[in-house]
Image (tube, rainbow, N blue to C red):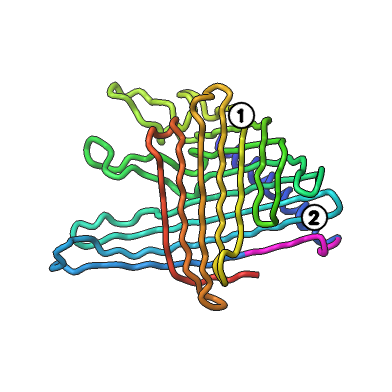
């Protein structure tokens, strides 16, 4: 199952990238493209006599983002690929060793047909997962780490048809009353167990299944991408999914990234993720990352 899913996603990405490249070769005047890659590093520490306590740490994060926007007559096509991975190592004074700090694979493709100056009929697909295993540290009874995620465990694929409102070039909202979402859990080892040792549902996927299909009564996706100051760019993406089978339990996710360009090759970046999926946790989940490092844009 995992190999089939991997092959499916790889094939979809390859077909999309080939179409993207072929269309771009025909007439690049209709394309607006931007690619960024780089890495950031961070370090902090205290000595043994520091009264406030603390731990020494260092980390590094790498990222690759590319986006292409096609517009000709009433037709639009947007492809957005974002890859991020980071590690942090804490040491000294009972340090905990190497851990992930950020881990994201994100691909979104959207085709639209303009109905007016600000409204379009759109359809698209979105794919999200991660590169490496994730753990709840010290969560097992013996104090060992509990595996709770891995590549394709979970993974989310969403297909939608709806209306896009784009009042400004840097801001748009897609309202999709017709949305389908597949949640994949390809590794049963990420499932928690009850007191009797029986596996429990994970990420909304029942025991004995690796794929859960959900119909959305409404999905809303809002995007903001703008230079808010000189050499300072802010990206925001908010996604809301209302499941037809769980109307009172709405999934919410916000991704934010700010990049401040210091000079041609160096910048400071900050990432923030806030999400609430009550089939994962009844608490609001957050993750953040800050770094200083190399950035190349073309």
Q: Nearer the viewer, residue 6 or 104?
A: 104
Q: Nearer the viewer, residue 107 or 76?
A: 76
Picture residue at 65% right of the left edge, 52% below the top:
171
Question: Would residue 192 appear left or right of 237 to someone viewing this image?
Answer: left
Q: Which label was assigned to residue 126? A: none
Q: Is residue 4 magenta?
A: no
Q: Does residue 4 appear in the picture of this structure?
A: no
Look at the picture and state if 185 lies above or below 269: above
Quadrant containing the C terminus is bottom right
- The picture places residue 250, in percent across and down from the top left corner, at 51, 31
Look at the picture and state if 125 lies above or below 181: below
Look at the picture and state if 210 lies above or below 223: above
Picture residue at 39% right of the left edge, 26% below the top:
200
**Badge 1 density bin: few <14, some 14–19, many ≥20, Cα 10 Å:** many
Q: Secondary structure at mark 1?
A: strand
Cα gap from disc 1 to disc 2, whole angstroms? 29 Å
**Badge 2 density bin: few <14, some 14–19, many ≥20, Cα 10 Å:** some
Picture residue at 62% right of the left edge, 37% below the top:
158
Q: Earlier in the sequence, mark 1 or mark 2?
A: 2
Question: Would residue 1 appear left or right of 119 to someone viewing this image?
Answer: left
> What residue sits right under mark 2 in the picture?
71
Question: Would residue 62 appear left or right of 5 to someone viewing this image?
Answer: left
- The picture places residue 157, in percent across and down from the top left corner, at 60, 38
> What residue sits right under mark 1 in the picture?
216
Look at the picture and state if 112 lies above or below 293: above
- The picture places residue 183, in percent across and down from the top left corner, at 55, 33
Q: Secondary structure at mark 2?
A: strand
- The picture places residue 251, in percent across and down from the top left corner, at 51, 34
Task: Specify start and end residues of the magenta stretch as a single range.
Answer: 27-35
């Amino acid at each position: 199952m995992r190999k089939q899913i991997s092959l499916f996603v790889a094939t979809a990405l390859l077909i999309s990238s080939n179409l993207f490249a072929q269309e771009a070769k025909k007439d690049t005047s209709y394309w607006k493209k931007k690619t960024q890659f780089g890495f950031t590093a961070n370090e902090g520490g205290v000595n043994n006599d520091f009264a406030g306590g603390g731990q020494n740490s260092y980390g590094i994060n790498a990222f690759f983002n590319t986006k292409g926007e096609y517009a000709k007559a009433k037709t639009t096509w947007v492809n957005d690929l974002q890859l991020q991975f980071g590690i942090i190592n804490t040491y000294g004074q009972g340090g905990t060793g190497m851990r992930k700090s950020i881990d994201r694979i994100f691909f979104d493709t959207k085709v639209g047909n303009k109905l007016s100056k600000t409204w379009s009929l759109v359809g698209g697909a979105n794919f999200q997962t991660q590169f490496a295993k994730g753990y709840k540290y010290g969560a097992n009874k013996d104090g060992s780490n509990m595996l709770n995620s891995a590549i394709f465990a979970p993974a989310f694929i969403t297909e939608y048809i709806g209306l896009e409102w784009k009042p400004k070039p840097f801001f748009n909202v897609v309202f999709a009353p017709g949305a389908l979402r597949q949640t994949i859990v390809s590794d049963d080892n990420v499932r928690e167990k009850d007191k009797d040792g029986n596996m429990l549902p994970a990420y909304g996927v029942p025991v004995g299944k690796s794929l859960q299909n959900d119909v959305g009564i409404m999905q809303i996706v809002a995007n903001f991408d703008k230079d808010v100051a000189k050499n300072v760019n802010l990206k925001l993406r908010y996604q809301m999914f209302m499941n037809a089978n769980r109307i009172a339990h709405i999934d919410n996710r916000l991704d934010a990234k700010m990049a401040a360009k210091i000079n041609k090759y160096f910048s400071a970046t900050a990432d923030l993720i806030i999400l609430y999926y009550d089939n994962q946790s009844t608490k609001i989940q957050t993750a953040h990352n800050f770094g200083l490092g190399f950035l190349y844009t073309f």
